[in-house]
Every structure is written in structure tokens, then in C-alpha cells.
Amino acid sequence: MGLSGKKKLLQLLKIASVTLGVYIIFKYMLPVILPFVLAYALCRFLYPAACLVRRKIKLPVGIAGTLLVTITGALALAVFYAGGSYIFGQIRKLIVHREQYSAAAADIFYSICRVVSNFTGISFENVSDHLGQWLGQMITVIQEHWFEILKDHGFPVIRGIAAFGIVFAVALLAGALLIKNKEDIDRHLKQSEFFWEISEITAKLCKATWCFFRSQCIIITLVAVVCSIGLKLAGSEYAVLTGIVIALLDALPVIGSGTILIPWAIIDIFIGNYKAALILAVVYALCAALREVLEAKLMGNSMGVNEFYMLAATFIGMNLFGLWGIILGPVGLVLILELLRQLKERYKM
């Protein structure tokens, strides 16, 4: 093997090693160190404000940091509580009026059967009998396996919420302690041989994570607003709740807002509600355009990575880590590129 072949092999080994290392960290170490990662992010965000409070009112930075962390945690809990209360209120309202919506669903079902009958020439009774039998079988299967469905999907969500509460509490405590002892910790870290490399990596990751969250929050908020307004114009009684759900689905690769809006528009066409169908089609087009333009502008450019690579990283991350891969995929890509850059600089030196 020539010198050029050895260099290529070495480069492939470096890429494979760094990628495997990042995967192992995210897969096995991140659940353990997550509270302290969040605490570090809190420290970077709040430490300048704590220093400002110390200069203005001569309050020790530890006390100032504790107050700021407490206020941040209280605001986060207030937002979660308000959002959760609204969503559960909408769900409760939906349950209370379930008979009304069951009748509306039956009207939609018979309208679809009528359209299928007119299109195929099959009698309305045969179409409704066959579709009704199919829906009845599906409902029976769901009723028979509801416990398995709850166990596979509901219980993990409950455990995840409980785990998030523990992580959140530990992160707040660790963040306050980190702000209080930041100067001592920095002094000890500067004695490390890898201080500058670690500083560059953490700075790059913080920037990448902040850009990702900021971009997604902006996009999700705008999509939720557009969907809520459009659904309200289309006559939906739960426009805000549905708009939020569609905006969250829109953040997922492959799924997108069309998962709900397109079938909804088709159903409106079947039942003759052409105005609502047109509104839903326009809403879908606006949502797709918003994400296409803003994601490339806000996330790809800010993180310094091509938007195609960001999409690929998000999709691969979801396959490797589930829903968390939406965040871990792009952040992992930035971490891999930064580690390879540092290895290249060190190899040159």
C-alpha cells in the first residue's frame, strides 16, 4: 500500500473512531451525565447575569446564581403547567362532547361511503357494510389490545416524564453549584493539558445546541400559529390544540404536517366542504414553505453545516436514538466534525 493509500486508510479510521466514540457517548453515557450537561448550559446562560448582579448590588455570585436558577426553574415550570393545563382542558372537553363528535364522525363516514359508491358504482349499502365491518374489526383489535398499547406507549411516556422531573431538579441544583464554584473550577481546568481542546468543543456544542433549539422553537411556533389560524378559519373547534400537535409533528423528519392536513383536506373534499379543504391545502403549503426556508436559513447557516447533512443527521439520529435523535443527530454531527477538525490541527502540529 502506497503513502496515499495509508493516508486514506488513516483518515477513514479516524472518522470511524470518532463517529463510534460519539455514538457510544450519546447511547450509554448521556443518560447519566444529562443533568450536568443541562447544568453546564444553565451556567453558561446565567453566569454573566449573576456577575452583573454581583457588581450592581454587591450580592455574592453564589447567592445571585441560586436566585437566577430558581427563577428560571419557576418560569419553566409555570410554562409547562400552563401548557399542560390548556392541553388537558382541551382533551377533557373532547371527552365530554364525545357523543357529539361520534355523530359527526358517523356523518363523515356515510359521506365518504356515498362518494365511494358514486365513484365505483357499488351500492351504498355494500360500501357502508364493508367499510363499517373493517372499522369495527379495527376498533375491536384496539379494544382487545389496549393494555398492550398502553404498556408499549403510555407507560414509557409516564416513566419519561418522571425521569425528566428528576433530571430537571438535579440540573437546577447542579447549575446553582456550578455558578457558585465556576471560578475555582475554571482555575483547575486550566491546569489540564486538554483545556483548550475541551473549551473549543464545549463552545462549539453550546453554539450548535442553542442554534438548533432556537431554530426549532421559532419554526414550531410559527407553524403552530399558521395552523391554528387556518384551522380556526376552517371551522375547527380545537384549532389551537390541533395546531400545536401538527407543529410538533412537522418537526419530525418524514412525518411532517401533511400527515394530518392532507388526509383532513381529502375528507373535507369527500363531504363537500371545499372551502375548508382549500384552507387546509393552503395551510399545508405555508407550513412546508416556512420549514423549508427557515430551517435552511436559521439552522444550517447558523451551525455552519449544509442543510442536507443536517436532514440526514436528524433522520439517522431518530433511527438510532428515537425521538431524542431529533436533537442528538444534528448535535452529534457538529461534535464529529469539530473532533475531526481538532485531530487534523493536532496532526499537522
Image (spheres, rainbow, N blue to C red):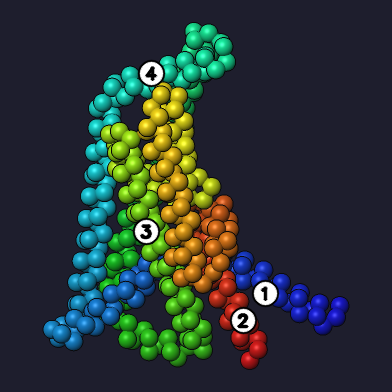
**In the image, residue 313 lies at what x, y percent?**
56, 60
Q: Mark 2 points at which residue?
A: 343
User: Do the numbered discs 4 and 3 sit on residues whose CB atoms are within 8 Å?
Assistant: no
The tally of labels here is 4
- Mark nearest the camera among 4 and 1 is 4
Query: Disc 3 marks which residue?
Result: 217
| 93 relative to 288 in the view: left or right | left
Q: Name the residue at 29% across, 78% down.
A: 47
Q: Is residue 159 above or below residue 114?
A: below
Q: Residue 14 carries which label?
A: 1
The amino acid type, in three-letter code, at marker 4 is Ala
Give the position of the N terminus as an image quadrant: bottom right
Q: In this view, does 146 lie above or below 50?
A: above
Badge 2 element: helix
Q: In which quarter of the image is residue 85?
A: top left
* Gap in angstroms between the C-alphas marked 1 and 2: 8 Å
Task: Kindly report which numbered mark, 3 or 2, lies closer to the viewer in this rendering.
Answer: 3
The CA distance from mark 4 to mark 3 is 37 Å
The image position of residue 46, as x and y in percent, is 28, 74
Residue at position x 47%, y 37% from top?
A: 262
Q: Which residue is drawn at 28% across and 80% down?
A: 48
Packing grade of label 4 (10 A; few <14, some 14-19, many >=20) is few
Q: Residue 106 bears which disc, if any?
A: 4
Q: Is residue 183 above or below residue 123?
A: below
Which residue type does callout 2 highlight?
A: Leu
Does 84 sit above or below residue 191?
above
The amino acid type found where label 3 is placed reads Cys
CA separation in Å, label 4 and label 1 = 60 Å
What residue is shown at x 56% (from left), y 54% (from top)?
315
Foreground of the two, 296 or 56: 296
